[in-house]
Every structure is written in C-alpha cells, then in structure tokens.
Amino acid sequence: MKRLITAGLMFGNLVEVSSPALIERYNRALKRLTGKTTELTDFHIDISGFSPEIGDELNDPLYLNPKGANRQFILLTTSQKSAPLLNMTFSTSRGILQQFIETNEAQLFALTARDAVAGELQGSVFEVTTPARLLELRQVRVEADTIGGHVADADKLTGLIQRFRTEPDGWRDEALIAQMIALATKTGDITSQAIALPAMTFSQPNFWTSHFGGVYVFADVRLPALICTQPGLSLGDTAKGAQLPLFDLTQRNAIADFLERCGLVEPIVQARGMDGAAVIRQKMDFILVEAADVLGLDIGDARRTELRKIAYKLGDALPPEFLGLAALLNWIDGLAAWPRISSEHPAYFYTLRATSGPNRDLVNMLLSELSPLDVRQMFITHKELFYARYATWSDRKKQYVVDFLEREYQVDRQGAREALFGPEPSMDVRDRPHPKPARDMIQAVGPWGAVRR
C-alpha cells in the first residue's frame, strides 16, 4: 500500500494532530468514549476522529465504531469536514457527518476552540446480527457535546435564566443566582453568544453496508430490494424481510431488471454531457492491462499504442468484456450497427452509469462491483473494494494503476467525477424525495433490448 500512500491515493486529506493541547483533548474524548487513551505524540484523524495509527496502537480498527453499528466521533476542528472516512461500514456515514459539521460549523468552531466535541451516529439498532436487521436502519440521529458538557450546561443555564426572569421572586432566590453564576463561568455569556448543538435526524432508506460481506439496501425505490455481494445470504423468517427480494451479484439478469425498472441507470453512450467514446476506450485499456497481467505479457509504458499491440497478440483470446465494448465503440464511430448486449454479457454493466439523483453514488458503487476491471470507477466510488482488490494485484499492475490515477485523477478530482458521473447530488441526506423512474423506451426495456429474466 506504500505506493498508494506516497501518491496521496490512500490516507489522503487526513488531519494531523501533533499539538500537545489537541492530543490532551483527544485523549479526554477517547477516554470518555472507549475507556482508552493513546501514548502517541502525533497522529492523523479522519472526519470521525478515527486515527489509523491509534487503531494500530490499540490493535482495534473499530475503536470508535463498536460492532460496526453506531459510529462514535471526535471533533477537534471543523476542518475535519473535508477528510475522508476510513473503515466505512455504512455508505451514508461520511455524508451525515459532513452535513452535521457544515450545518453547525459556527457553533462547532466556537466549541472546539475550548474542548473536543464527541458524539455518536445513533441508528435504530445497537448491533447487526442478522441481515433482516438492516431493514430497521431507516434513520440516523446525531447527538454531540463537548467533553466538558458545555452544550448541556448552556441548555441548563438557559432554563435557569428563564426562571430568573419569570418567577416573581427570582431576583431574590440566592440559590438560583448561585447556580447561574457557577454555570456561566463554564459556558460564558450565552445571552450574547448562544451555545446550541441540537440533535439532527437523517433518513437512511438506501445504503451500502460492509456487514455480511457487503449488502446494498434499496428500501426507498419503486421496487425495493436487497443486493448482497456473496451468494447464500438469507434474511431469515421475518415477515418484513420475506417480502423483500434478495439478489446476489451472480444474478445479473435480476439486478439489471431491478436497476432498469427503478430508473437507476442509463447507457454511457446516451448520458448527457459525457464523452462516451473516451470513457469506453479507457475501460477497454483497463481490461487489456488485466488480461496482459494475467498472461504475463509486457505492457511497456502501458500507453494506448502499446496496449493495442497486446490486443493484436491476444486475438481470439480477447476478454468478452473488451469485445463487447469494442462493438459499442464501433457503433459510436459509425463503423458498425447498434450492438445488442444482454445483461448476461460480461460487458453489460460496463456500459452503464447511474442516473442523476440522491442514489447516484450508491448505484455507481454497485456498478463498480459488477464491472470490477474498471479500476478508475472502483477507486472513485468504492475505495474499500479497490483497496481489497489492489492487495491481490501484481506489482506491475499496481504501478500502472497508481501512475494512471495520479496522472488522470489526482490533478482534477472534481472534474473527473463530474465527467464520469455527472454533477454532484445534494449532500442533504434528510428527507430526500423518491427518485422518479424514467419512462422513455430505453428505460422501459433496457439499454440493449429487453432484459432477460
């Protein structure tokens, strides 16, 4: 993983913590949440305050996320809002944390100037022991306060001030006044600078979780379903679970039918504002690199001219994914008729991207599992899967992928994402509207003809 770290493709944008004052605050928060402290004199934290160095020190990568159900967080600075989320167990967690910080940024800036803020993403369950429990995770509530309890004290002081102002003998109540003075020494003057950090609730109807090998929950779409990455998963005998279709990644026809009926995908070649030909050519390059790596063929500098030579060498042994995309590219260039690529074809999911809307990133994440040779999409949309796959590659392929991402993605991340997937969806994960399925002929029968069931 050293190549990825050196190139800024792993652990990038983490917040450095080296100040003794901040380390002391972090340890107070860590002690409160976990009963443990760190002996490190410098480390880095993600948006939730998780530190990979402390995870190694404690031999517990889930020290802020016990049982992977309700992630705890430590905020030392509002600049954490731009940091990634490591060891993600739910795809919605980073967006929820980011919006919580941005919504309360002024208050958090003032609070973190004096103390660490700690809190929790509270789901409706305390553990996820069966897949059926995932269906209960419809909302996440975020509550936080400083370790010193400044927000709670400010709320208490507000109530005492109200009593002082409304009770007839409040101004003569010495015990009441003493309480107010004692709290004011901790909170400051809340009448001129209010302290408030209200709990926020976020809806989480559609999400991915790393539990049970990886499960996609689509509960708020036209035809709700669960898609698991490993076959053989069962929801159990719950009445609610029994009514919800459960697919695995081997059921390509069923997944294609689900995505089309819910209006969640569109063909790359017809996506608005997208250079479909360029994207398809790059996908073909990735496929050739994998094929050459498996056969031990020299890819030279891995530029397109060198990869074309690999294609000539492979001849009839070219991967079906490559051949399907090549047929589509020939149609774009006006050299052949429109290809009919069924959902059983290995190239099928390489030809799609998610439609715009609140489910865009989740669907692109699923598509990266169904088109695993597209390493760029996998890196952008599903880093957990990318890092797991990267560990299995040869040094030759690792170097090629790192060089490509450093050259083609790092220089303009936002531009690359928009070019591939369209404009960013709203960060507001609260009360999102239901996506409206498209009604044109392509969405009705599938991009390459009727989906086989």
Image (cartoon, rainbow, N blue to C red):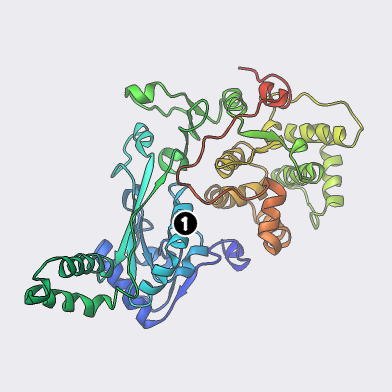
Q: Nearest the camera: 312 or 427?
A: 427
Q: Nearest the camera: 94 or 165?
A: 165
Give x and y (percent) for residue 393. Answer: 62, 50
Q: Which residue is mark 1?
A: 99
Residue at 53 percent of width and 51 percent of height: 427
Look at label 1 and name its amino acid: Gln
Say whether residue 318 is visible. Answer: no
Indicate the quadrant where residue 106 lies. Answer: bottom left
Residue at 60 percent of width and 61 percent of height: 9
Residue 401 vs 318, above or below: the answer is: below
Q: How many marks?
A: 1
Q: Nearest the camera: 154 or 408?
A: 154
Residue 338 vs 95, above or below: the answer is: above
Q: Nearest the camera: 306 or 177?
A: 177
Q: Quadrant of the N terminus?
A: bottom right
Left or right, 395 with respect to 333, comes to left
Q: Quadrant of the C terminus?
A: top right
Give x and y (percent) for residue 203. Answer: 42, 43
Left or right, 414 with respect to 105, comes to right
Residue 67 vs 97, above or below: the answer is: above
Residue at 42 percent of width and 63 percent of height: 104
Residue at 32 percent of width and 77 percent of height: 24
Neighbour class for label 1 at 10 Å: few (<14), some, many (≥20)?
some
Give x and y (percent) for residue 414. Answer: 66, 58
Give x and y (percent) for residue 27. Answer: 30, 72
Q: Residue furthest top?
A: 453
Residue 35 vs 276, above or below: the answer is: below
Indicate the quadrant where residue 112 lies. Answer: bottom left
